[in-house]
Structures are given as structure tokens and as C-alpha cells.
């Protein structure tokens, strides 16, 4: 007998509907699996056979041919265990096949018959909803993740026996309901609640830059000697960012689901991502890649922060991979077999020492590096890369009296309120521009419309371009930063003092 079960496969961060056709016929007992399965799918033959027996079902002692369609699409991962198991049960008439055409089945099976969570359920659920599929049958740990998609019936099952009973007695089971706290976003930001700006002593200039970066989504680099608080400041940026909207949370969760970071969590990602890869990271690990491309750190940082600590310790060729994503907000990964485009709208935050010994420009400890060593050290950061970093801030070590005093700075809650007000002004101005969410994303035509300068401000900017040798890109980014400074001040028009403050943040890349 022939049975067809629907499942899905992930391509990039999208899903493709996959048919699992199972034919049980006469012949020597055995299982033949067709349709470009990878090793994990090939292994499902023995896994499913043992699972069905241990779960109390009869395994057909006949020839079983399993065809995964479309035949030219490579099938990966253990998520096909459940649809293959259901297909064998339906083809051997052990379950009712009436509902098989209405649902997608996803899940990994254990040898005792229990179902284990799999990656990529959210994008698959979104694709199923667009295709008019009635619902999904998934492991219980994936149920809340799938239920986020509206208009889709989701059943979460603990084991294969429950799936069989669901097919035979569908009226006895109720669909999973989405936990409303997931959708409404109650208590977002709890992950960063214990990382407060109030803990930072001094560093008023760096704190101001952090606030501007949060309000405008600007890239930021801290340069200073060891122990000056660069990393401490950077790790407090997520705590002053506005919470993710529901639409943004869906985008972020979709990427994390494909990367397998939602297994056994089963909910939306409510906090803005904060990714901090080690400086030994490779280029593909940052931008994504592999024979069958998967998201890298820049895509996992989408709508959040990518923090590169000790920036000059990264390999230069790895850092150069960031140039195009920083400019475009997405990355296209091309391989012989396929090409995919992944979103990568992130805020880059970096920190580095000013020289190999770390004390160049320090007022307390003299630098022991030669000019040649400092030049070689900064050569790892190319001009085009530094051009894309809007805020370049020198962080000095604290004075002894500042170290011993109690922290007296503003809390993250207070700063976050100003950031939210500035963002609200920005979004109000960007009405009619659905692809703009912050000032850092503005293009040239937007600058001409919303960053008009009077004569004083224009002369100031022209003088800075001449003296600092700034590129056209750098001057545009100065205007974006100035626009954010004006938003924080609640002003509609750019003034000379807004531009002057923005220019202050474009001098670090000239120090080498």
C-alpha cells in the first residue's frame, strides 16, 4: 500500500515542502530510501525500525520504499524520523490516513518512541501557513514555537503512540494554544537586568557615545588601555536598547530556530541578540557558510549587537568579510549547489587596545611600543572598515579617586527612556519608509531630506572633511550621528553643535 506524508526541509532560513512517500509491497524485507538524503536521514531507517517495535507497533516484514520529494533537493537532519514513521504506519494500515494530507509532520524519534525537538520549526510553520496547510504535528518541546504562527493548528506530542492516537481519534486532542506572555512580550530584557550602566564609574564621554549608538543604531568602537572599562561598557548596550517588536522578534526567532538555538526552549526570542564570538573565529563562522549554508554570527545578531572584543586580534581577512554586510544589512552566501541571502542588520560594537602593549596615549603608564609596532598593529583595521564605524571613542583609565568612589552614574532604565523617546521621534519621521527603523539605516536620499544643514553647520563639516581627510561615506555617517544627537535633544533641525559633537567621534581611525 502507498501512503504520502508531508514534511519540510530548511533552505537557508526558508522552508520547502517535502513529500514522504512510503510504499509497502512484496519482496525481500528491507528499506530503500530515495531522494538525496544525508547521513542523518539515512540513519533514520534503522532508528525508525527499532522505534516502531519498541513503541508496540508491528514493523512490516516486507519491502519498504521511501521516496522524499522533490528528488533534486537534499534532505538534511533528523526531522524526517516522524513523517517516515507515520508513513510506514499508514502504509501498513496501522493508523488512519485521512488527516495525512492536511498536516506537516516534524520530529526526531528516540528508540523508546519519544519525540525530540528539532531545529527550524518556526520557518517551516510560517511556510505551511502560506501554503494553506491546516496544521503541524511536532514534538511537545517545539509546540509553542510553531504556535506563534497565526492561523495554524498545532499539535504537540510526547511520543509516537500519541501521534498514532491523534490520527485515529483526532477529536480526542486539542490544539496547542500560544502562551500569551510570549506574544505580548511580558518581562523582556530580564537577561540584561543585572547588567546596569549604574555600575560604570566615570567615563561620561563613553556613556554618551553608548546612548547615541543605542538611539540611532550606530556602529561603535572603544579604544583604550587595559582595564579602562571598554568591555564593561559594551556589555551594557543591550540593556538600554528598545525591546523587540513582535515582528522583529519573529525575524530573530526564525534565524535562531534554523540555527538550532531554540531546541527545548520553545518560545520567541524577546531580548535583542548579543553575540560575542572569540577572536579566533573564522570568516564563515561570522558571515555564515558551509556546504549547505547556515547563518553565521552576523545573522544571529540580526536586530541586535555583534560585539567583537579585542578587535585587532581578529585576522584582517576575517574582519574584511564584515564590510558588505555592514553596508547592506544582509549577506549573500554562494555555493556550487545553492545561493542564499541571510538578513544581517546588526549594530557592530568593538573594543581594542591602542597598541600592542596597550598603553599608547595613557596618562599613567608610558607606552613601550615603537612607531613601527603601532603602525603594524592598526594595519589590521582597514580604512574601509573603520569608515563604517560611526562612533570611535577613546576610553581612558580611571583616576585613583574615581576607582575608589561608589558608582554614581545614571541607571540603564533612565538612559533607556531617553533612547526610546529618540527612537519614537525617528519612527515618526520615517512613516512611509517601512524599511527604515533607525537613523543608521538612512541612505543618501534620506540625508538630503532630513539632514539639511545651515551655512554654519555646512562650513564646519567641510572643514572637518578637509582636516581629517574624511571620505564621502564618513561624512554621511557624521550626518546620521548628528541626526541622532538632535533626536536625543528633541530637536527637528540639525544645528552646528550637533554636527560638532558628531565630528568628535571620527578621529580615532586617524591616530595610527
Image (cartoon, rainbow, N blue to C red):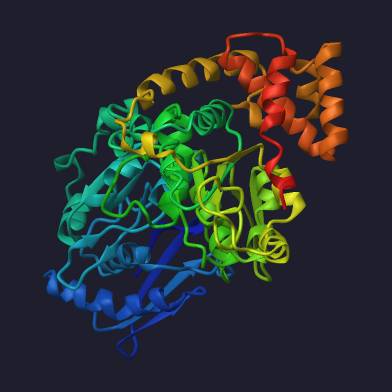
- Residue 249 is situated, as x and y percent measured from the top left of the image, at 43, 35
**Residue 30 position by quadrant:** bottom left
Residue 115, placed above or below residue 446: below
Residue 114 in picture, x, y percent from top left? 18, 63
At x 49% / y 58%, what residue is drawn?
10
174 relative to 222 in the view: left or right: left
Q: Position of residue 32 (x, y in %)?
A: 40, 82
The answer to whether residue 95 is left or right of residue 451 is left
> Is residue 423 in sight in this rendering?
yes
- Which image quarter holds the N terminus? bottom left
**Can residue 128 be seen at all in this image of the molecule?**
no
Vertical comparison of 393 with 297: above or below: above
**In the image: residue 383, left or right of residue 163:** right
User: Is residue 91 depicted above or below 397 in this figure?
Assistant: below
The residue located at (86%, 20%) in the rendering is 459
Q: Quadrant of residue 88?
A: bottom left
The quadrant where residue 499 appears: top right
Residue toward you, 295 or 413: 413
Q: Nearer the viewer, residue 429 or 431?
A: 429
At 20% from the left and 44% from the top, the residue drawn is 170
Q: Position of residue 386 (x, y in %)?
A: 70, 47
Nearer to us in this view, 6 or 308: 308
Q: Depth check: give the residue in front, 64 or 93.
A: 64
Amino acid at each position: 500500500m502507498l501512503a504520502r506524508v508531508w514534511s519540510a526541509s530548511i533552505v537557508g532560513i526558508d522552508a520547502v515542502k517535502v513529500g514522504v512517500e512510503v510504499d509497502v509491497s512484496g519482496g525481500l524485507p528491507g528499506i530503500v530510501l530515495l531522494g538525496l538524503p544525508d547521513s542523518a536521514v539515512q540513519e533514520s531507517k534503522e532508528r525508525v525500525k527499532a522505534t516502531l517495535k519498541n513503541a508496540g507497533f508491528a514493523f512490516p516484514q516486507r519491502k519498504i520504499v521511501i521516496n522524499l520529494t522533490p528528488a533534486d533537493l537534499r534532505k538534511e537532519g533528523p526531522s524526517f524520523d516522524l513523517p517516515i514513521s507515520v508513513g510506514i504506519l499508514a502504509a501498513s494500515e496501522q493508523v488512519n490516513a485521512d488527516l495525512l494530507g492536511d498536516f506537516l509532520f516534524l520530529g526526531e524519534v528516540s528508540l523508546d518512541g519519544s519525540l525530540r525537538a528539532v531545529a527550524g520549526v518556526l520557518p517551516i510553520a510560517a511556510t505551511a501557513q502560506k501554503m494553506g496547510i491546516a496544521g503541524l504535528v511536532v514534538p511537545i518541546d517545539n509546540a509553542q514555537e510553531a504556535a506563534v504562527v497565526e492561523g495554524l493548528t498545532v499539535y504537540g506530542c510526547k511520543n509516537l503512540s500519541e501521534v498514532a492516537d491523534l490520527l485515529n481519534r483526532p477529536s480526542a486532542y486539542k490544539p496547542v494554544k500560544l502562551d500569551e506572555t510570549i506574544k505580548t512580550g511580558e518581562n523582556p530584557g530580564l537577561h540584561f537586568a543585572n547588567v546596569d550602566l549604574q555600575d560604570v564609574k566615570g567615563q561620561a564621554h563613553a556613556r554618551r557615545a553608548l546612548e547615541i549608538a543605542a538611539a540611532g543604531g550606530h556602529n561603535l568602537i572603544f579604544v583604550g588601555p587595559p582595564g579602562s572599562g571598554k568591555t564593561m561598557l559594551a556589555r551594557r548596550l543591550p540593556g538600554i536598547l528598545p525591546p523587540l517588536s513582535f515582528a522583529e522578534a519573529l525575524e530573530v526567532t526564525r534565524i535562531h530556530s534554523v540555527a538550532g538555538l531554540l531546541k527545548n526552549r520553545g518560545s520567541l526570542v524577546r531580548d535583542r541578540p548579543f553575540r560575542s564570538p572569540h577572536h579566533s573565529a573564522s570568516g564563515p563562522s561570522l558571515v555564515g557558510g558551509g556546504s549547505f549554508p547556515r547563518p553565521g554570527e552576523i545573522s544571529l545578531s540580526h536586530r541586535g549587537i555583534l560585539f567583537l572584543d579585542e578587535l585587532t586580534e581578529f585576522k584582517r581577512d576575517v574582519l574584511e568579510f564584515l564590510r558588505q554586510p555592514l553596508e547592506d544589512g544582509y549577506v549573500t552566501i554562494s555555493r556550487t549547489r545553492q545561493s542564499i541571502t541571510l538578513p544581517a542588520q546588526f549594530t557592530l560594537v568593538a573594543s581594542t587596545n591602542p597598541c600592542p602593549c596597550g598603553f599608547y596615549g595613557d596618562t599613567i603608564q608610558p607606552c613601550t611600543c615603537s612607531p613601527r609596532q603601532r603602525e603594524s598593529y592598526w594595519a589590521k583595521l582597514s580604512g574601509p572598515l573603520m569608515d563604517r564605524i560611526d562612533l570611535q571613542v577613546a576610553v581612558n583609565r580611571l583616576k585613583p579617586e574615581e576607582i575608589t568612589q561608589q558608582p554614581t552614574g545614571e541607571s540603564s532604565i533612565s538612559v533607556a527612556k531617553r533612547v526610546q523617546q529618540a527612537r519614537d521621534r525617528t519612527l515618526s519621521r520615517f512613516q512611509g519608509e517601512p524599511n527604515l527603523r533607525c537613523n543608521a539605516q538612512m541612505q543618501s536620499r534620506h540625508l538630503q531630506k532630513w539632514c539639511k544643514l545651515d551655512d554654519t553647520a555646512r562650513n564646519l563639516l567641510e572643514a572637518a572633511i578637509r582636516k581629517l581627510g574624511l571620505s564621502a561615506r564618513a561624512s554621511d555617517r557624521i550626518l546620521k550621528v548628528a541626526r541622532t544627537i538632535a533626536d536625543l535633544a528633541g530637536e527637528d533641525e540639525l544645528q552646528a553643535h550637533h554636527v560638532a559633537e558628531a565630528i568628535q567621534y571620527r578621529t580615532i581611525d586617524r591616530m595610527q
